[in-house]
Image (cartoon, rainbow, N blue to C red):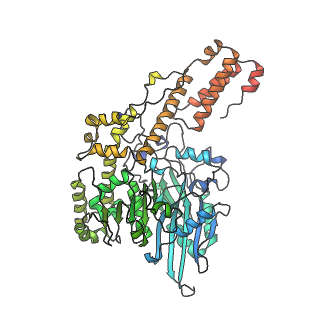
Amino acid sequence: MALQGPEELGEQVEEPEDLDDQDASSISPAEEITMPGGPGGDDEPEEALLLPWDRFSAWLHCICVVGFDLELGQAVEVIYPHHSKLSEKEKTSICYLSFPDSNSGCLGDTQFCFRFRQGSNRKSSLGVFLETTDRDAPPCLKREQGHYYGYVYFRQVRDKSLKRGYFQKSLVLISKLPYVTFFHSLLKIMAPEYFEKQEPCLEAACNDMDRWPTPHPGRILTLPIMGVVIKVRIPTSYDKPGTSQLVQSAQSDSQVSIVLPTIHEVDLFRCFYPVFFHIQMLWELVLLGEALVVMAPSPAESSDTVLALVSCISPLRYSSDFRPYFTIHDSEFKEYTTRTQAPPSVILGVTNPFFAKTLQHWPHIIRIGDMKQAGEMAKQMKVKKLKNLKTLDSKPGVYTAYKPYLNRDEDIIKQLQKGVQQKRPSAAQNAILRRYFLELTQSFIIPLERYVASLMPLQKSISPWKSPPQLRAFISQDFMKTLEKAGPQLTSRLKGDWIGLYRNFLKSPNFDGWFRNRRREMTQKLEALHLEALCEEDLQQRVQMHSEVETVDLVLKLKDKLTQAEREQLPVRPGTVAKLRAHIDAVILALPEDLQGILHKPSTP
């Protein structure tokens, strides 16, 4: 999906109308979906085929309750639904990651999230269906392949009736979806009820979720849960980057209790406030996939900051590993803390002071103090300077020897400082910072998009009777030559060593992930254009010029194209697949009956 400017990049990109007028038009033409009507939405044709627990599984893998046992330590007490599968290694990861470190001192209720490797290559029976729902999602909101997210609601309160003197328990939602804001909002409804009413309440919540429509990008959903109705819109890759996802309330929304303006965005300003003099340098470090560790006083601050870092290069997807909350018990602890090799491309969020020693050889360390209200931190913010230290003291700040490629943008610093002085609402500060990061990332990516678009063969080179032409190779030197006249200077006022930044980026996992995705999309586009060209041909006339053997060969090849189009959800014009199916049927009918019996299968609707 191109990030910006269809007129600049030579590709047609759909953009939604205003949300008030938005309907299924914001969804790709290949999939026309009726917008849901009442609570829970109307059934889609494909959703009518879903089995019990399939709808639940489209949102969550399972729900866990993790408690503390004096003899066993942390243990998974409940997994719901009961048929959900977790390996022992996954259960161990969930146990350790669901509780704050003892030194965090989290009394009361705490919410945070973690991310851990999937222990086994288990395949979902919903695989193909979920791929369809995932196809139109923005890169940063696609379903995780090899990892799970854990969304935690942890409660620690004094209880003299217990031997330890404290009640400690976590309710954890395990999901492949990075909908952090949505799942935290869901937990705020579910967890207090669960701690009061226990497992029957959990069963009721899961039954509610199994009646939800699946999370199709572009759809506005009303989701009933435990007597509350949440209204959300799932973003789509066709949305204009940076536009608000706010769902406008209407007269018919009288039953809606909560309207979530976003399902995934964290408050960037609040997260970056302790180090906001260095936001541009942090953007460069994340863009280049540098090894970063965030040291914070609690899992909530650790996970929020890591998620803010990952999202600051949006709409570019962060392609390396990241762990919003990482502990010494993590199965990757040795792999990520070894000194025998350079630190890996990963962002870690930690709270245990032990990491200050274990990771002091890492090149970039962000130390976060307690996140207070923005106004209260102004003094500390002005005093703090970037330090270049070999050892780590306890003061908040960014510790690195990294020299940024770009000159610092003083305007954004002044604008945010002015907002603090004038007590501008945090939401407005967050919007300013998110817009700044978006424009910076787009200025960086547009030249790459423009060059990659030039690698696409001309449409006139596509012949229905030859294999689709190949994309031309990405040649770094050729791309660099384009920067002189069509570089980021066209859209960004920032000066500095842009060439050096690009040169480093082309060696990073983020470039590799971005280019793989663009190459796959463009290859699918070529396949789709080839398919459309085939549909425009007079196949009957062609068949008359060839032998039966050649005709059978043609039918088999066309069937393969049809299978590919459906399996890969090729971006063809509406009606193309049905047209090709009709062509195949017509060609088969022109063959002798014995061959028809072998080749002809009834068309599926």
Q: Residue at x 59, y 62 (%)?
A: 90
Task: Note whether residue 259 is visible.
Answer: no
x then y, percent, for residue 435: 32, 51
x then y, percent, for residue 114: 49, 63
**Residue that protrudes farthest toward the top in the picture:** 545
Nearer to us in this view, 74 or 224: 74
Report the side of 543 relative to 515 (left or right). right
Residue 551 occupies quadrant: top right
**Residue that protrudes farthest toward the front in the picture:** 340
Nearer to us in this view, 12 or 356: 356
Instruction: Give the total number of marks visible in the rendering.
Output: 0
Q: Residue at x 36, y 50 (%)?
A: 287
Report the side of 431 relative to 154 (left or right). left
* Quadrant (top left, top right, bottom left, bottom right) of the C terminus: top right
Q: Residue at x 55, y 38 (%)?
A: 569
Residue 427 occupies quadrant: bottom left
Report the side of 153 relative to 81 (left or right). left
Give the vertical position of 128 relative to 540 (above or below). below
Give the vertical position of 253 relative to 585 (above or below). below
Give the vertical position of 222 relative to 14 (above or below). below
Report the side of 499 relative to 140 (left or right). left
x then y, percent, for residue 459: 45, 24
x then y, percent, for residue 387: 26, 64
* Quadrant (top left, top right, bottom left, bottom right) of the N terminus: top left
Task: Note whether residue 503 is visible.
Answer: yes
Nearer to us in this view, 365 or 308: 365
Q: Residue at x 61, y 14 (%)?
A: 541
